[in-house]
Image (cartoon, rainbow, N blue to C red):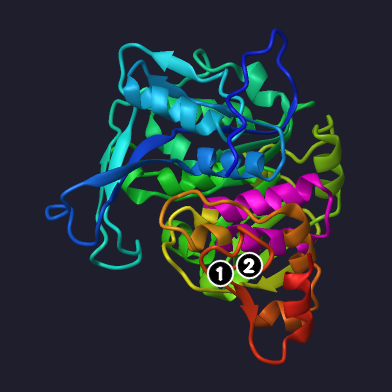
Amino acid sequence: MTATGPRTAPDVVETVDVVALGESMVTFLPSRPGPLADVPSFDRGIGGAESNTVCVLAAAGHSARWISAVGQDGFGDHLLRAIGEYGVDVSSVRRDPHRPTGIYFRTAGDRGTDAHEVAYYRAGSAASAMTTATVDLAAARAARVLHLSGITAALSAGCLDLVRELTARRPGRPLVSFDVNHRPGLWRDRDAHGPEVLLELARGADIVFVGEDEAESAWGIKGGPSSIREALPEPEVLVVKQDARGATAFHRTSAGSRAAGGRVGAGGTPSARGCATHARPAPAPATFVPALTVDIVATVGAGDAFAAGFLSATLRALPVRDRLRHGHLMAAAALTVPGDLATPPARDLADRLAALDDTAWGRLRLGPGWTETATAGAHTDAGADRAEEEVRTP
């Protein structure tokens, strides 16, 4: 990916397409497969749900800002440089002289297997000390879309208050995107009511991303996407990720127009707190798009990339089906590399693939390197002539 260099701090807070707020950590990836006890060396990378999403959006051509806190240490220097090189504005990231930058180590195996190991060293990190008093709230709100996740809310009481402040429905706030990202281990030592808190925060957002299995583990919701929508009627857009099957989006038409305008009016949806006393919105239509067939290298970062693709298409006011397809394409890019971040497909290629008919879309297969050129790694099953033609169009 071409590095554009970090942006410098402006005199006046510039309104950008997307702001993401949350912790990023230095990631150590093993040099070979095997248990952490046996891995002799590691390669350094970066990882964090919100920073992953905003880096992909910046690489896809959107103006973007990341807000967080890092230590006054070498790892903090690395994060600022690495994220800034994607073209992300990092001028609102606070340097904390008293707390370290978080780091973590992981094995090369898939997170879904018993052999996978992750060792986090983030307790007491600079980002965990973020509060409404230490974060530049004006910079956070100077966006068409503000992207948050449940991970930040789980880091500390101060971080939870910060996320509550940013998801509070007030006139003029940006469109708020919220990825539930339920991490039971983060909540275990802090708050037994973590799932309830996540539900509260999701109800205050405009666009919500949640996995079908995640909704069952956090909230005990069974019965598929429709049951999840019944529990979360407030968000204008609810995206339910259904693993390898695909994703379903419940949507109302006003979310797309507000993404283009970038602000919530005074007559927005009622606050999540006490929402049971309000009349529930009318049922919204649902759109399902199947996932692509992908030669998977690693699953890390795929959910963050999916959110980036969906938000990118939302900012461009594309139809909901195409928003889901762009999400799948960005996820496919992440799935075909070993780290958290991948080069996204060029916009013209992604648009051509997103416009395929259902048959051609279903026959696409994407492998490592497919985003580097219009033809590398992308192919179709025999008979999917139109899909192959679209992928190979110069």
Q: Is residue 110 magenta?
A: no
Checking the image for residue 311, the label placed there is none
Say which quadrant the C terminus sits in: bottom right
For label 1, count other residues whose C-alpha is less than 10 Å away and answer few (under 14), some (14-19) or many (20+).
some
143 is higher (above) or lower (below) than 330 = above
Find the magenta span and give its range.
304-332
Which of the pair 377/200 is nearer the observer? 377
Please indicate whether residue 159 sits to the left or right of residue 344 in the image: left
Left or right position of 98 against 145? left
N-terminal-most mark, 1 or 2: 1
Question: Disc 1 and disc 2: Cα gap in Å?
Answer: 5 Å
Q: Which residue is mark 1?
A: 242
Does residue 38 sit above or below 26 in this rendering? below
* Place of residue 262 in the rendered image (x, y in percent of width and height, measured from the top left): 80, 34
Q: Residues within 10 Å of mark 2 (few under 14, many from 20)?
A: many
SS state under label 2: strand
> Where residue 253 appears, x then y in whole percent?
86, 53
Is 385 placed above or below 348 here? below
Name the residue at the top extreme: 11
- The answer to whether any part of residue 129 appears in the image is no
Q: Which residue is mark 2?
A: 247
Q: Give the residue drawn at x 35%, y 42%.
A: 187
Q: Quadrant of residue 269?
A: top right
**Looking at the picture, how far across and down is residue 138, in whole percent?**
67, 17
